Image: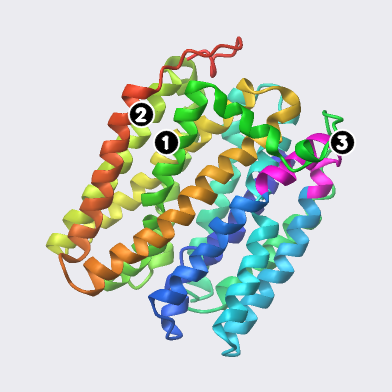
């Protein structure tokens, strides 16, 4: 558990350095909304292409920990090169291209390592939230280091720190226990990950993945524009403030063991969706009043929202799908959340931001109200459509 925890810590620390600061880094160098959008699109486009196929390779062909380690090393090199382009004032398209390359390689890392961890944990439902907590603490540590030590809230140094951390994580991963493939299929369809889409034939799976994609659309705004709102509201340490979301995530991780044993999965997911709408309501209040408290409380709620939805989802899939498809199922979750949902969300949220905030047609108040309203409608739809009837003998999946 200690080694898995350390790996999650490094895995969370890497994006924690640059993701909260990315918008401010780009705007500091004169990048307008067009380039900010393309920088944020790199991850979602990559998540459409690689997580499921890499998961299929881990399920059928290669030791998962070695595959994970090597993609970590390669993505670290590409990430460092991308921020070097920013530092020397290179062409924006070079930065976007290198970010896309890094994201394409790194996109399967979270889903793949979640499968590795759950494979080696004897009691996944009790132990996985505690091990996954390492990623939360890594993200928090990176946020505070970015703001308080590196002073890199708007500097490419945040990207360099991320690349170094990811490279160290790749090396460390190569020392982890062997996680051999369980499947043995050599068909091209299987190796490309197409078999994972068979999961959508079941009603609850289809509702769950559709909800995940739709939730991920307004969720993009949290990462993409909250730092800008904080900065505009007068917060000089936006990256450190964004790390407050991980405080509630720590509490939620520690509570997950008890929550999964006492509440239905549907209940946990509905609570997460409802809190997500409340969070944007608080942001809207800050936008209307200029009081930073709503932003701070809303950021703090983020960790609870994220954990209750996505960690519950990972455990749900790990227990519900056949063992030979677990990496692919986690990759499919990444495809719908980090891929399809985030891709559409990045485009739509940027258009909404330009129309409402930049053009001053309602400002931040209307921006967050519209996004919060979307989540509220999604919560109602999920409550009506999801049945929670599947059973495989696990407390997670039988609820």
Nearer-N-terminus badge (1/3) = 3
Q: Residue at x 59, y 72 (%)?
A: 159
Q: Residue at x 44, y 55 (%)?
A: 344
Disc 1 secondary structure class: helix
The relative height of residue 186 versus residue 219 in the rendered view (above or below) is above
Q: Is residue 160 visible?
A: no
Residue 51, how many percent across, how many down? 66, 47
Q: Residue at x 41, y 79 (%)?
A: 27
The span from disc 1 to disc 3 (Cα, nearest Å) is 32 Å
Q: Nearer the viewer, residue 119 or 184?
A: 184
Disc 3 secondary structure class: loop
Disc 2 secondary structure class: helix
- 307 left or right of 178? left
Residue 144, how many percent across, how many down? 48, 63
- 162 left or right of 193? left
Residue 255, how many percent across, how many down? 46, 29
Q: Nearer the viewer, residue 322 or 193?
A: 193
Q: Which marked residue is nearer to the observer: mark 1 or mark 3?
A: 3
Q: Nearer the viewer, residue 58 or 170?
A: 58
Q: Which residues are magenta?
A: 51-67
Secondary structure, magenta segment, majority class: helix
Q: Are marks 2 and 3 in contact (CB under 8 Å)?
A: no
Say which residue label 3 marks: 186
The span from disc 1 to disc 2 (Cα, nearest Å) is 7 Å
Q: Residue at x 33, y 42 (%)?
A: 276
Say which residue label 2 marks: 382
Asked which quadrant contains residue 176, the reply is top right
Residue 292, how many percent across, how many down? 23, 61
Say which residue label 1 marks: 211
């Amino acid at each position: 558990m200690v080694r898995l925890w350390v790996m999650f810590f490094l895995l969370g620390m890497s994006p924690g350095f640059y993701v909260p600061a990315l918008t401010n880094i780009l705007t500091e160098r004169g990048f307008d909304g067009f380039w900010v959008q393309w920088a944020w699109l790199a991850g979602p486009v990559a998540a459409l292409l690689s997580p499921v196929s890499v998961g299929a390779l881990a399920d059928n062909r290669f030791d998962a920990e070695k595959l994970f380690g090597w993609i970590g090393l390669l993505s670290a090199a590409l990430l460092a090169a991308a921020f070097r382009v920013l530092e020397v004032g290179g062409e924006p398209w070079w930065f976007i291209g290198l970010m896309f390359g890094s994201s394409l390689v790194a996109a399967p890392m979270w889903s793949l390592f979640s499968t590795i961890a759950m494979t080696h944990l004897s009691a996944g439902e009790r132990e996985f939230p505690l091990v996954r907590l390492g990623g939360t603490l890594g993200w928090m540590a990176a946020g505070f280091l970015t703001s308080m030590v590196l002073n890199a809230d708007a500097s490419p140094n945040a990207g360099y720190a991320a690349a170094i951390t990811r490279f160290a994580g790749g090396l460390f991963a190569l020392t982890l226990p062997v996680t051999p493939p369980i499947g043995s299929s050599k068909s091209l369809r299987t190796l490309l990950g197409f078999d994972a889409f068979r999961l959508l034939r079941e009603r609850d799976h289809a509702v769950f993945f559709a909800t995940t994609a739709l939730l991920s659309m307004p969720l993009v705004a949290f990462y993409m524009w909250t730092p800008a709102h904080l900065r505009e509201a007068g917060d000089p340490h936006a990256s450190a403030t964004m790390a407050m979301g991980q405080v509630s995530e720590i509490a939620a991780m520690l509570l997950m063991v008890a929550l999964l044993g006492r509440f239905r999965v549907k209940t946990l997911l509905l609570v997460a969706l409802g809190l997500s709408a409340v969070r944007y309501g608080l942001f809207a209040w800050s936008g209307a009043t200029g009081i930073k408290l709503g932003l701070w409380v809303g950021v703090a709620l983020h960790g609870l929202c994220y954990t209750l939805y996505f960690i519950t989802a990972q455990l749900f899939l790990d227990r519900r799908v056949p063992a030979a498809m677990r990496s692919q199922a986690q990759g499919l979750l990444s495809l719908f959340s980090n891929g399809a949902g985030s891709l559409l969300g990045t485009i739509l949220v940027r258009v909404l931001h330009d129309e409402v905030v930049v053009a001053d047609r309602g400002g931040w108040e209307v921006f967050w109200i519209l996004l919060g309203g979307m989540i509220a409608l999604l919560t109602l739809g999920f409550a009506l459509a999801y049945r929670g009837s599947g059973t495989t003998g696990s407390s997670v999946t039988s609820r």
